[in-house]
């Protein structure tokens, strides 16, 4: 199959909510045309839907290195921001914060 066929199939899977299969199709797009930013953009969105923030971030970063138009660059940058912000929030949510009842003497003025 060609790039467009995999993209269209991926889009069908995406629209039906089958993001795992969409990821596979978009990865096929990238394998066929590694300099086509569309594959990376679509892959990033599918990963965002699967809450795979690191994979989405990586797809956006790779897509931004490809020659493309400004509209697609903006889309990739937006998705990169979503992935980075969500990843940061997830990390913050996983932190265990312990209250300190008594500060050591050298920190008492804080």
Image (cartoon, rainbow, N blue to C red):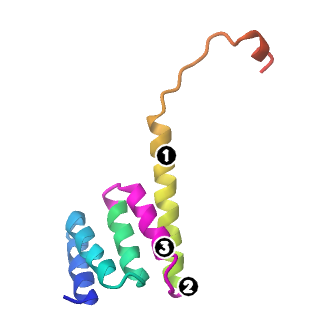
The residue positioned 77% from the left and 21% from the top of the image is: 110
Residue 3 is a magenta residue: no
* Above or below for 49 versus 27: above
The residue positioned 53% from the left and 21% from the top of the image is: 98
x, y (%) of residue 46? Answer: 32, 66
Q: Determine crowd level at label 1: few under 14, some 14-19, many 20+ residues with C-alpha closer than 10 A.
A: few
x, y (%) of residue 102? Answer: 66, 9
Query: Image quadrant for the N terminus?
Result: bottom left
SS for dot 3: helix
Q: Which segment did they paint magenta?
A: 49-70
Could you give the CA–CA distance between mark 1 and mark 2, rounded to whole angstroms? 28 Å
Residue under label 2: 70
Mark found first going from the N terminus, 3 or 1? 3
The residue positioned 41% from the left and 56% from the top of the image is: 53
Q: Quadrant of residue 27?
A: bottom left
Residue under label 3: 76
Looking at the rendered structure, which numbered label has been put on residue 89?
1
Q: Determine crowd level at label 2: few under 14, some 14-19, many 20+ residues with C-alpha closer than 10 A.
A: few
Query: Between 50 and 104, which is closer to the camera in this rendering?
Result: 104
């Amino acid at each position: 199959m060609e790039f467009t066929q995999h993209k269209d199939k991926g889009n069908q899977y995406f629209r039906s909510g089958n993001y795992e299969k969409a990821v596979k199709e978009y990865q096929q797009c990238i394998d066929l045309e590694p300099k086509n930013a569309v594959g990376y953009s679509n892959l990033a969105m599918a990963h965002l839907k699967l809450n795979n923030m690191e994979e989405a971030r990586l797809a956006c970063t790779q897509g931004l290195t490809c020659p493309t138009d400004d509209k697609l660059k903006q889309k990739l940058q937006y998705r990169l921001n979503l992935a980075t912000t969500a990843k940061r929030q997830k990390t913050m949510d996983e932190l265990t914060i312990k209250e300190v009842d008594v500060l050591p003497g050298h920190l008492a003025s804080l």
